[in-house]
Amino acid sequence: MIRAPSPWEPVIGLEVHVQLRTETKIFCRCPHRFGAAPNTQVCEVCLGYPGALPVLNRAAVDQAVLLSVALDAEVRDRSTFARKSYFYPDSPKGYQISQHDRPLAERGALPLARHGRAVPIERLHLEEDAAKLSRSPDPAEKQDRLDFNRSGIPLVEIVSAPALRSPAEAHDYLQTLHRLLRYTGTSDANMEEGSLRCDANVSIRPKGSADLGTRTEIKNLNSFRHVARALHYEIERHIRVVEGGGRIASETRAWDGATGTTRRLRPKEGPGDYRYFPDPDLPPVRVDRERIRRARASLPELPWRRRERLAATFGLSREDALTLTSKRELADYFEATVAFAAAPAGDVANWIRGDVLRELKDRGHRIDRAPTPEAMAQLVDLVHDGTVSSIAGKRLLGKMWGRSEAPRRLAAEMGLLQVRDGTRLEAWARGALEGQAPQIALYRGGKDGLLGYFVGRGMGLSGGKADPKALARLLRSILDGENT
């Protein structure tokens, strides 16, 4: 059954909160290391004691400026902090220090990796994180727990325009931003540890309409998969409500991954509800042109530019280039391997995006634990020139981890070097044909594809040591030249 096209268009905007990779918190000298014992990385400032004065962390500003430049945003020469008032257990002061009417940067853009367009960024601003609020693991306790280690960690909030049109685009946006954060080193962007969190705003409107519908906000989504699932659910919920004659309430909702549904938390707040006013303890943040120039000069090659260069320089497919640039270290490894290899770059790409990544996943290793680029290039060359078969190359790769031997020597020790000796090849070829009279008759009757079947039998008899091309030539010669 073909489903009729929906008359509704989703409108999605994302607010992404990113913990910056600094040694200390944004307004005090407390360290912030994930996994520390609860409430051990705290002081009077991040606990909100009366009279404790905040002092802005310069490194947090530098990283926020670097990220703004990477997003091609306009950095203000003078931005200001405000107090955002709300009363909740995770806010020790009863307000959050954030930026409101004069954010650090505005009007940027993020080029999507898979959807071929750039999404406008409305603003990027600095603020402090709140404490971590969690339930006791013991249901009998019926208590909430507060860990103030997270309170005061420097955040940047990146707000997209309401320009995303599907959960797939939102997923692409988040993955692209995640990649940028890792490339620039501004955050580890670990969603499982909470250093990258997302609030999603969603509404629907009739296709072709320029008006925006009533939006709901889904809070604290902490995985790419949850973002896509939550948006799918919420879009369908909006459509059901509207088509059923109801009205969407402007509200904040929570996502329940176990049930695959959202639930109402509270009415949606507006700026007036937070009673913003300038923070009297913090002077304006001043960013001069020289600071921006230094930030721009320190930028690495950004992932979307590197992807385009690799595709153009090495003739890679879009998918290969996208995979190889998914992490800066992986792209570095690929280019270093290509520099050592005599084989085409496409062969190197196939090995890295296939077998190397599979080994990394199975072993739980990072790319810096893989065979060196020089050793990897030697392996690719051994397979490319026929010294070892592709099957033997996979076995060889599995033995190269943590070993210093040259791949050719290791292949010889493992007995993987392909045999091109005519006598041995002929023995394997004739063994492959033994007892195969019906298949031989079919081959001679025109089923040329059976040659691959015979080669496979011969390779099996050789234990993968036979040169498959030489074996195929010999088999063809025997089949075409003899009556069996």
Image (cartoon, grey):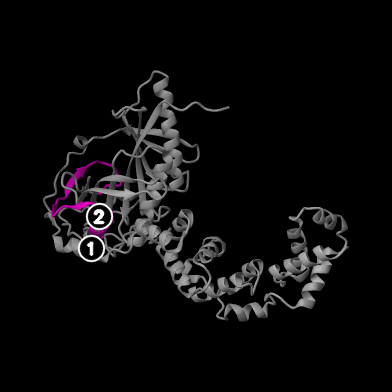
Q: Residue furthest front?
A: 481
| Nearer-the-camera pick, 434 or 109 | 434
Q: Residue furthest top?
A: 245
Crowdedness near tag 1: few (<14), some (14–19) or many (≥20) residues, C-alpha within 10 Å:
some
Q: Position of residue 35 (x, y in %)?
A: 40, 60
Q: Position of residue 11 (x, y in %)?
A: 35, 34
The residue range painted magenta reads 63-92
Crowdedness near tag 2: few (<14), some (14–19) or many (≥20) residues, C-alpha within 10 Å:
many
Asked if the residue under mark 2 is in contact with the one under mark 1, i.e. CB atoms within 8 Å, the reply is yes
- Image quadrant assignment for residue 266: top left
Residue shown at the point (48%, 66%) measured from the top left: 366
Q: Which residue is the site of mark 1?
A: 295
| Nearer-the-camera pick, 354 or 454 | 454
Q: Which residue is the site of mark 2?
A: 68
| Nearer-the-camera pick, 320 or 53 | 320
- In magenta segment, residue 71: yes
